[in-house]
Amino acid sequence: MTSNATIAAIATPMGQGGVGIIRLSGPESLIIAEKLFVPGPRFKGFKAYRLHYGWISGKEGQILDEVLLAYMPGPYSYTREDVVEINCHGGPAVLGSVLEALFEQGAEPAGPGEFTKRAFLNNRLDLTQAEAVQELISSPTQTGALLVRDKLQGHLGSRVEKLRLKLEDLKKELCLAVDFPEEDVQCLPRNVLAEKAGICAEEISGLIASHEQSKVFREGALVVLAGKVNAGKSSLMNALLGRERAIVTPVPGTTRDYLEEAINLNGLPVRLVDTAGRRPTRDEIEMIGLEAGRSLIASADLCILVVDSATEPDREEMEILEEVGSDKILVAANKWDLVDSRPKWLDGFPGLGVEVLPVSAKYGNGLEELSSKIRTKILSTRRVEACSNMAPNLRQKNALEKAAQELELLVNEADGEVPFDLLGVRLDYACAHLDEITGRIVSEDILNSIFENFCIGK
Ligand SMILES: Nc1nc2c(ncn2[C@@H]2O[C@H](COP(=O)(O)OP(=O)(O)O)[C@@H](O)[C@H]2O)c(=O)[nH]1
Ligand SMILES: [Mg+2]
């Protein structure tokens, strides 16, 4: 499946940087690079895995850049092919001219993710590791990146592979039972088959659950600020962001649409949303804004109900509490700076199982406590830290679900009269779905859809 072409691309992001790297991979890598490389004074020929100082020249012999060139012969390279990496200066024009010179010498432009795809096709990585490369690069926070590292090392892949081996063993036992039907009972009693398949299905369910649990680290948790007009939602949004993003005025109904901004809560990526305040209205624009707010609140991982500490929560605020439920809500008692003593209404809240945190968005008080509460509240329902280092991505989760479905069907059917060879087909299907995850057997379509989301140069 691997193409024989030697491919080249800029591997570092576009823009200005101290260094920009151009990567070549394929049988002609060194030959092409050699044609353009003008060695520095102490050069004594290319040595594998060493840096070589020199210059890259263009077609007319003009110097394009001063570089460090590394030669990594296969199979000990990223792609397992011969790889050359040229460290140039990191400017788009410099990199562009060096890349063009390589194309003139016969290199072909690399497609999206083609280096990693070649690494996969040459068995240096399984598919879960190849996908982890992309997941690692796009992790929004360090904690999120930490969760991907085990996958990059192949731990998810080997876990899935182990599961597959268990299913294969079960299949062998099943075949024995089919071949020697008279010994049916001794070979593989139906209840044992069901039990073994059930154990595998459960293990798969565990992996599926960790997808949900770690989702917040990949996609960010949705935290929605809700409440009545003028409670200080926009002020709190700005205070948490640390800049004046939302317009704040004493005029009720200042925010009519919703605003979304990303923040990093100690490793947890959060999509923080400010919504229009609740109040009865006939204004068409405001009504649309309120509706948008409602559906955001409904899909939020956490809702912060912002209330004015000086006034007892009223019907609209209680309505939000009921809509969301105590699991997914925190109350921010705002404008705490304006109250002299602890307001009486607060005492009614703990009974509802809702936590109330005093804050002053205007003066920046209570924000750290609020931030850390937001984080722990979101994570407490997910047990994220414990088990998500192998969390499958969406594609992998879908394949796991299909595998689990086959096994669950098998468990049910094993109890009845369904013949063993038909039950064996369920095991085959389950294995095929697991193979899609590791890439042991995978269609060209799936491969393309995975790698086309990669950047060029990866
Ligand atoms: N004293 C005091 N005033 C605040 C506080 N937070 C917001 N305000 C004021 O309350 C008014 C409404 O604030 P805003 O953030 O626009 O409320 P929103 O309608 O809920 O978005 C503005 O005049 C703010 O300056 C606070 O913590 N203390
Ligand atoms: Mg507002």
Image: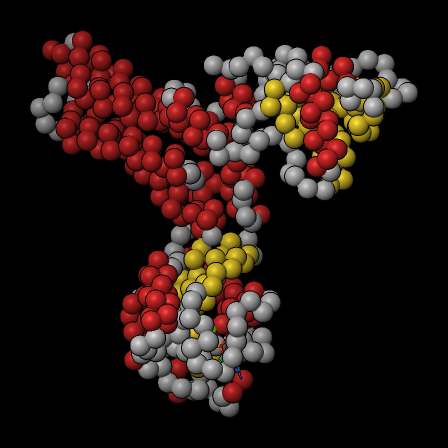
- Image-based side of 41 in relation to 428, left or right: right
**Extreme bottom residue here?**
340
- Image location of residue 386, percent across then percent down: 45, 46
Question: What residue do we see at 73% from left, 26% from top?
Answer: 98
- Residue 199 shows up from this direction: no
Q: Quadrant of residue 281?
A: bottom left
Give the camera-side residue of 234 and 77.
Answer: 234
* Point 58% across, 24% down: residue: 110
Q: Nearer the viewer, residue 44 or 217?
A: 44
Q: Is residue 450 left or right of residue 170?
A: right
| Relative to 42, 452 lies left or right | left
Residue 279: give x, y in percent of width and height.
34, 78
Residue that lies at the very extreme toward the front in this rendered image? 60
Indicate the position of residue 162 as horizontal and vertical percent values: 39, 25
Coloration of the structure image: secondary structure
Q: As displayed, is residue 142 above or below residue 304?
A: above
Count of number-bearing discs: 0
Residue 427 is drawn in which quadrant?
top left
Give the residue furthest to the left. 417
Above-or-below relation of 438 to 263: above
The C terminus - image quarter: top right
**Of all residues shown, which one is farthest toward the top?**
179
Question: From the viewer's perspective, is 208 left or right of 384?
Answer: left
Asked if residue 210 can be seen in this view, the reply is yes
Which residue occupies 32% across, 23% down? 432
Q: Residue drawn at (45%, 43%), measured in percent from left and top?
A: 388
Q: Position of residue 434 (x, y in %)?
A: 35, 27
Residue 354 lies, with reference to residue 76, above or below; the image says: below
In the rendered view, would you say 83 is above or below 18?
Answer: above
